[in-house]
Image (cartoon, helix red, strand yellow):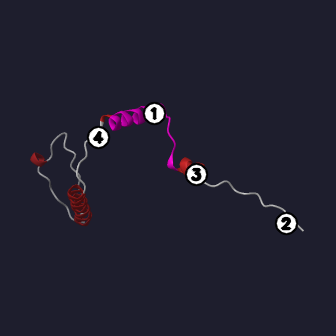
Amino acid sequence: MATITIPKEMIRKNDDSVLIPRKEYEALSHTRSAQESLRAHLLRKFSEVTPTKAELRALKQGREAMKRGDYMTLEQLHHELDAPRRQARRKKA
C-alpha cells in the first residue's frame, strides 16, 4: 500500500477534500464531462422558454398541492389507469 504525506497547508479546517483511487477519479471525471457535453447539446438543441403568467400560476398551484401532500405517485397513477379485470362469463350452451 502506498503512503502519501499531505502538507498541512493543503488541508484547510473546513475543506471537504476526499481521497479516492485514481481509477475512481477518472471514472467520475469522465461521467462529469459526459454530463457537461449532454447539457451543452441539450442547450443548443432546445432554447430556453419564458413561462407565461398562466404557466407560472399553474406551477405555483402544483407546488402548493405537493406541499399539502395532494398528489399521486407514478405507481398510483399506473394502478388507476389499469383496465379493470373482466370477470369470466359462463359459456352459453
Q: CA distance from mark 2 to mark 4?
A: 58 Å
The residue pinned by badge 4 equals 51
Farthest-out residue, right: 93
Residue 6 inside the magenta-drawn segment: no
Which residue is at 81% across, 61% downward?
Answer: 89
Q: CA distance from mark 4 to mark 3?
A: 30 Å
Is there CB contact under 8 Å for labels 1 and 4? no
Image quarter of the N terminus: bottom left
Q: Which residues are magenta?
A: 54-74
Which residue is at 76% across, 57% downward?
Answer: 87
Residue 81 — which label? Answer: 3
Amino acid beneath label 2: Lys
The image shows residue 72 at horizontal and vertical percentages of 52, 42
The residue pinned by badge 2 equals 91
Is there CB contact under 8 Å for labels 2 and 4? no
Amino acid beneath label 3: Leu
